[in-house]
Amino acid sequence: MTDYSSSQKKYQPRTMLTRLEEHASQIYTLELFRKVQAQIRREALHYVQSVIDDNINRVFMLDCYALEKGNAQVSCAKMVPQICCSCLHFETFGIPCGHLFHIAKVEGFTSIPNTLSYVNGRRGRKFHMSLM
Ligand SMILES: [Zn+2]
């Protein structure tokens, strides 16, 4: 079964976050999309331990169900579409981490925020964060 074809641009979703996964299939190259799918699957390992809201940012303290190291802090700016994670996976590898996908699910994102679309992996389209 072919789940993604660069010629047909069709795929079968492999995660539960189908809207985010579909959006990822549109904005990343196939190589990066495979890595993004793996990160979307990893979001299920995480849970929100606590939330700090200071009216400017909402900071989620995440822990991990697995025994591996999985703690992280995800910060969402309230006035601008900006979200970042303390693990620096995005800054290092150019794709969102499982922590960010977990918060995207918690916050009801239906697409990957523009600020998390790595320029080198994109296909030249413009996207904006949207909420359900
Ligand atoms: Zn992270």
Image (cartoon, grey):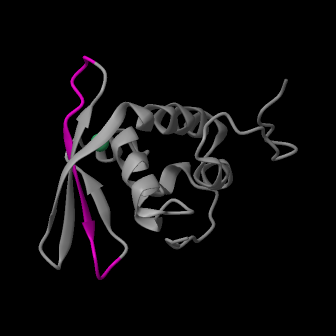
Q: Nearer the viewer, residue 94 or 54?
A: 54
Quadrant for residue 66, please give it.
Answer: top left
Quadrant for residue 33, please give it.
Answer: top right
- Please indicate whether residue 37 sits to the left or right of residue 102 in the image: right
Quadrant containing the C terminus is bottom right
Q: Measuring from the top left, give residue 51's x and y in whole percent.
A: 18, 58
- Please indicate whether residue 57 sits to the left or right of residue 92 in the image: left
Q: Residue shown at 53%/73% (left/top)?
A: 130
Q: Measuring from the top left, give residue 115's x and y in whole percent.
A: 40, 64
Residue 102 is inside the magenta segment: no
The image shows a total of numbered marks equal to 0
What residue span does the magenta drawing correspond to? 67-80
Q: Residue shown at 29%/82% (left/top)?
A: 79
Where does ligand 1 appear, by image quarter?
top left
Vertical placement of residue 31 versus 129, above or below: above
Q: Measuring from the top left, give residue 101's x and y in whole percent.
A: 43, 48
Q: Nearer the viewer, residue 92 or 34?
A: 34
Q: Measuring from the top left, give residue 72's x and y in whole percent.
A: 20, 41
Residue 78 is inside the magenta segment: yes
- Please indicate whether residue 97 sits to the left or right of residue 75 in the image: right
